[in-house]
Image: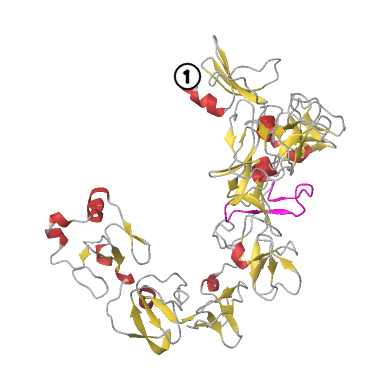
């Protein structure tokens, strides 16, 4: 690496190269030599790769390091084509108080080294002055005419995305159009994770009251946006459509669209289907409204089937809710930029628990997958939430900022948010069953969306104080109240099932429905949850409250 001995923009000096004075070798040099580590430039904060000695400089005394492009080469004023009206003065002590603190070309924060005109309040990084964007560009995808960079601080509205800009637009003088530098390369045809069809960029949606299907705010129809040719009412802001968490980064203009059959079953006759997840037998639709005791469960969503329409196997105990039977084989979701595939569960082939990345609950039902993204079918089917008893407005998926759930008062990043007020709901609370059966009460318990109460509420299960501002379960007939966790337990999103059988050992999820609660083989307490783990072999049988207790005892069980 080149060494700095004395320079007008840095206070430290070095009389001889550090490499010949081993007592002064910096810790950075030692780390690079020992571990091959690279460090960040003190000016732009971008990484300086290991072995880039011809493109970086380092101070031996303060261990600061810079890209060569980021540091000034002369203290003299410069004349730059981006600002031909006045010479630019080099400043090395940070932006003046009257400045907005940003570079006019890249709009990034000004730090130590930049050129400045006090008359025009014009500032430009040293690195940007050395490598400026082109003054004239041909961008036929953006506009038919040549575009010219206007190096000014004036605010403008970009015709491609409809949002405001502050500095240096590309302009077409004959058409009176202005564009952000990054918007001249907007893709024309793309897939996004909020819609099943391709969408295309247009420079005007046409007169109307348009609303973005991602942020759910107004779209100004006079400016550019994305729309769907198959769904006349679907439109998205240009900035929203090209977000990293929405678009997969692939331009599809000129790429033929492939048809994907997402139908999950074949119709055998009226009311009889053959489902891909149970193709060895046919399923018959059960439409009666009989209130069942919850002893049968849907194989897909794992919840109990009470009086809902469902498909039942004509030869075994396999059941699916009618809605679950219609889940598509492939779908898009806001938590993955690629299409998710429905994974079937077959007895003896694909058993096992998984954790949904949206609600973080454990399940052994059907799941949608792509790469390391795994969603249970409840969360995969939800990108919006509407329950006017819970909240007067519809909630929509957002993944931009962490927010506090209005139901459990905990903070999450992946939430459903109200665009009209500040209410937020996480996926776990949004997918809670509205009614549930529990051994503590003979009636159905209903989900209560919180109350303002002056007295204390006591949970019937754990017999501790319950915070009524959080959601809880209650019985309208008996007045019983319970914590959600006490009623559902950790495995509420799972169904009873044998998880593994090997070498004479069996691990299964079983209902906690015996007359007396079994004792946990790890913590020693009586298991309260509706579902629990049971391990057995030829000479022992142990029950465990939850995964934490099971993991603690895994070594002894294995031995």
Can residue 493 be spotted in the picture? no
**Quadrant hosting residue 113:** bottom left
Is residue 392 found inside the magenta-colored segment of the image? yes
Which image quadrant: the C terminus?
A: top left
Q: Is residue 298 left or right of residue 30?
A: right
Which image quadrant: the N terminus?
A: bottom left
**In this orientation, which residue lies closer to the viewer: 65 or 259?**
65
Q: Give, as a single range, the part of the protein colored magenta.
A: 382-402
**In this orientation, which residue lies closer to the viewer: 548 or 507?**
548
**Counting other residues with Cα less than 10 Å from the Cα at mark 1, is it few (<14), some (14-19), or many (20 or more)?**
few
**In this orientation, which residue lies closer to the viewer: 200 or 69?**
69
Whether 469 is drawn above or below 299: the answer is below
At 13% across and 65% down in the image, what residue appears?
Answer: 16
At 59% across and 88% down in the image, what residue appears?
Answer: 174
At 27% across and 65% down in the image, what residue appears?
Answer: 56
Q: Main secondary structure of the magenta part?
A: loop
**In this orientation, which residue lies closer to the viewer: 33 or 442?**
442
Q: Is residue 409 left or right of residue 22?
A: right
In percent of width and height, residue 272 lies at 81, 34
**Quadrant hosting residue 523:** top right
Q: Residue furthest bottom?
A: 85
In percent of width and height, residue 428 lies at 65, 41
Can residue 170 be spotted in the picture? yes
For label 1, the SS is helix
How many circles with numbers are drawn on the protein? 1
Mark 1 lies on residue? 558
Q: Is residue 261 left or right of residue 160?
A: right
In percent of width and height, residue 235 lies at 69, 65
Whether 51 is drawn above or below 164: the answer is above
In percent of width and height, residue 179 lies at 56, 77
């Amino acid at each position: 690496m080149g060494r700095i001995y004395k320079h007008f923009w840095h206070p430290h000096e070095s009389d001889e190269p550090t490499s010949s004075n081993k007592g002064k070798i910096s810790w950075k040099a030692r780390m690079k030599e020992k571990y091959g580590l690279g460090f960040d430039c003190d000016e732009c904060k971008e990484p300086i790769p290991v072995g880039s000695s011809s493109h970086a400089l380092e101070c031996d005394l303060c261990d600061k390091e810079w890209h060569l492009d980021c540091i000034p080469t002369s203290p003299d004023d410069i004349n730059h084509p981006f600002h031909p009206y006045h010479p630019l003065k080099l400043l090395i002590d940070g932006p003046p108080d009257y400045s907005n603190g940003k570079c006019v070309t890249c709009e990034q924060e000004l730090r130590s080294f930049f050129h400045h005109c006090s008359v025009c309040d014009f500032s430009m990084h040293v690195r940007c002055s050395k490598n400026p964007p082109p003054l004239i560009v041909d961008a036929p995808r953006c506009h038919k005419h040549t575009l010219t960079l206007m190096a000014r601080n004036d605010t403008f509205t970009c015709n491609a995305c409809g949002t405001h800009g502050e500095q240096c637009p590309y302009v077409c003088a004959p058409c009176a159009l202005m564009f952000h530098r990054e918007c001249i390369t907007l893709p024309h045809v793309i897939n996004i994770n909020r819609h099943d069809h391709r969408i295309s960029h247009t420079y005007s949606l046409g007169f109307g009251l348009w609303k973005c299907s991602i942020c759910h705010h107004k779209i100004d129809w006079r400016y550019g946006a994305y729309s769907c040719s198959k769904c006349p009412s679907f439109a998205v802001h240009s900035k929203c459509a090209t977000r990293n968490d929405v678009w997969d980064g692939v331009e599809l203009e000129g790429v033929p669209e492939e048809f994907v059959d997402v139908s999950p079953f074949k119709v055998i006759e009226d009311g009889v289907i053959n489902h891909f997840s149970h193709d060895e037998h046919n399923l018959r639709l059960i439409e009666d409204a009989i209130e069942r005791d919850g002893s049968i469960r849907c194989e897909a969503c794992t919840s109990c089937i009470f009086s809902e329409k469902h498909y039942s196997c004509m030869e075994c105990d396999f059941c699916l809710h009618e809605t679950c039977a219609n889940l598509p084989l492939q779908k898009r979701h806001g938590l993955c930029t690629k299409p998710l595939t429905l994974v079937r569960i077959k007895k003896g082939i694909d058993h096992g628990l998984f954790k949904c990345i949206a609600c973080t609950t454990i399940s052994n039902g059907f799941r949608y997958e792509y790469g390391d993204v795994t969603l249970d079918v409840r969360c995969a089917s939800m990108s919006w939430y509407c329950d006017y008893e819970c909240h007067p407005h519809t909630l929509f998926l957002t993944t931009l900022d962490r927010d506090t759930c209005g139901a459990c008062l905990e903070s999450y990043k992946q939430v459903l948010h109200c665009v009209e007020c500040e209410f937020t709901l996480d996926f776990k609370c949004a997918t809670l069953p509205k009614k549930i059966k529990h051994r503590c009460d003979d009636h159905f318990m209903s989900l209560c969306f919180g109350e303002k109460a002056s007295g204390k509420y006591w949970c019937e299960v754990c017999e501790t104080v319950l915070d009524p501002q959080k959601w809880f379960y209650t019985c309208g007939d008996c007045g019983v109240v319970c914590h959600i966790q006490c009623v559902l337990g950790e495995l509420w999103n799972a169904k009873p099932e044998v998880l593994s059988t090997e070498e004479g050992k069996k691990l299964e999820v079983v209902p906690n429905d015996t007359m007396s609660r079994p004792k946990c083989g790890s913590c020693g307490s009586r298991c309260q949850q509706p579902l629990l783990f049971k391990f057995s072999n030829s000479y022992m049988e142990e029950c465990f409250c939850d995964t934490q207790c099971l993991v603690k005892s895994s070594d002894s069980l294995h031995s």
